[in-house]
Amino acid sequence: MLASNKGAYEAKNSESIGLNISIPNEQEINSFTTKNMMFNYFFSRKYMLIKYSYACVIFPGGFGTLDELFEVLTLTQTGKLNKLGCKIFLVGCEYWKDLLKFFETSLYKEGMINKADLDLITLSNDIDFIGQKLIQYKF
C-alpha cells in the first residue's frame, strides 16, 4: 500500500487514499495519504478497497493480501463486481507461480473452477506492461 500511496501522492494530480485496519501492534497510517479511513473489521475495509476500483494490481504479501485477492476473484467470478471485469494483475511471477499452479492442477482439474476463472488473472513481472494495459482499458 505504501508504494501506491507514495506514487499517487507524488503525482499531485489525484487523491492518495489510505484504508487502514485497526489491529494490535500493526498498521499505522502512512505519510503519503491525502485522505484516510480506519476500519475495525476486515470485511468493511475490503469492501471499500474494491468499491470504487476498476482494476486490482496485487503485489506479494501475506494472509491479508491473499484474503483480498480471493475476495476480488470471488466477486469477479460471480459477477458481483461487474465494473472490475477481468482486470486483476498479480505482480511477481516467481512469487505467485505455485498458487496459480494450484488453481490449475487442483481447482480446475477437480472442476471447482472453469477455464474462464483462470483467465481472470494476468501474471507479470513487468510494471510497464501492466501500466499500459490499465491505460488501454476504457473505464
Image: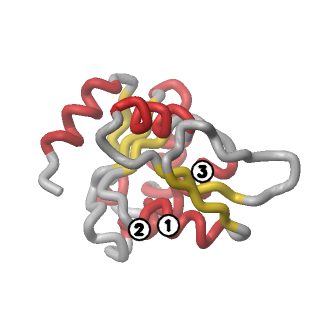
Residue marked by disc 1: 48
Tell whether 33 sits left or right of 67. left
**CA distance separating discs 2 and 3:** 18 Å
* Residue at x-position 20% and y-position 38%: 133
Circle number at residue 51: 2
Tell whether 40 sits left or right of 2. right
| Residue 78 position (above or below residue 11) | below
Circle number at residue 66: 3
Callout 3: 10 Å neighbours few (<14), some, many (20+)? few
The spot of residue 102 in percent (x, y) is: 54, 46
Callout 2: 10 Å neighbours few (<14), some, many (20+)? few
Helix, strand or loop at disc 2? helix
> Does residue 7 show up?
yes
Tell whether 23 sits left or right of 49. right
Marks 1 and 3 in Cβ contact (< 8 Å): no
* First in sequence: mark 2 vs mark 3: 2
Q: Amino acid at mark 3?
A: Leu
Q: Amino acid at mark 2?
A: Lys
Circle number at residue 105: none
* First in sequence: mark 1 vs mark 3: 1
The spot of residue 123 in percent (x, y) is: 37, 35
